[in-house]
Image (cartoon, rainbow, N blue to C red):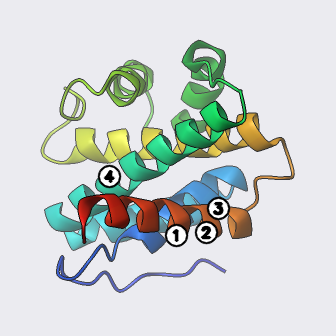
Amino acid sequence: MTEHHDVPPSTGPTPYLPLLLDLVAGYLEHDHARVAATATDIRDAGRPALDGTMQEAGTLIAHLHTVAFCAGQTVHIADLQDELVQLVSRAVPLHHEFAIARALEAITTGVGDGCPFGPGDTGDLLLLHTAAAYCALAGITIFGTGAFTPNGLRLMGLAARSLRDERTGR
């Protein structure tokens, strides 16, 4: 059963980590209903939820890359791109492959604000979908299939947030 979130206003530390983790877990488990419901919750909550969840995605991506580096591994974006486009394409409207590839480029290079695709927040939501799917695939690449589970993902997300907050003095 898909759970819907009451998205809090953007006050306090970062209330958006559970939304990101549900989106990533949906991609991990290939649960399209969970991905769609969580994305709808984020979209309906408005710009603060979208921005806050994307910030959490950036933190988790950085943490995953740090874990890989410390383990002597590397995550090669080129190796994940085809699988990522296929995974995200199942969760977003048809014919967004170019925008997904552009979103992946923006995530990996840190350049650009969202995707130049779609009206309003559509491009940014697509960027968030791409970031969440990237987290799922990078986690599987680093830890292996079956080892990177939704429960492990939640612990990693909390650790990433804690380390970020410690560094930024939050």
The reply to whether dot 2 and dot 4 touch (C-beta < 8 Å) is no
Q: Which label's residue is closer to the chain start, 4 or 3?
A: 4
Q: Which label's residue is closer to the chain start, 1 or 4?
A: 4
The reply to whether dot 2 and dot 1 touch (C-beta < 8 Å) is yes
Amino acid type of the residue that numbered disc 2 sits on in the rendered structure: Arg
Depth check: 117 or 54 in front? Answer: 54
Element marked by disc 1: helix
* Percent x, y of residue 51: 22, 56
Q: Is residue 90 visible?
A: no
Disc 2 crowd rating (10 Å Cα; few below 14, some 14-19, many 20+) is: some
Q: CA distance from mark 2 to mark 1?
A: 6 Å
Residue hosting label 4: 54
In what quadrant of the picture does the C terminus appear?
bottom left
Q: Is residue 6 above or below residue 38?
A: below
Q: CA distance from mark 2 to mark 4?
A: 16 Å
Residue hosting label 2: 154
Q: Nearer the viewer, mark 1 or mark 4?
A: 1
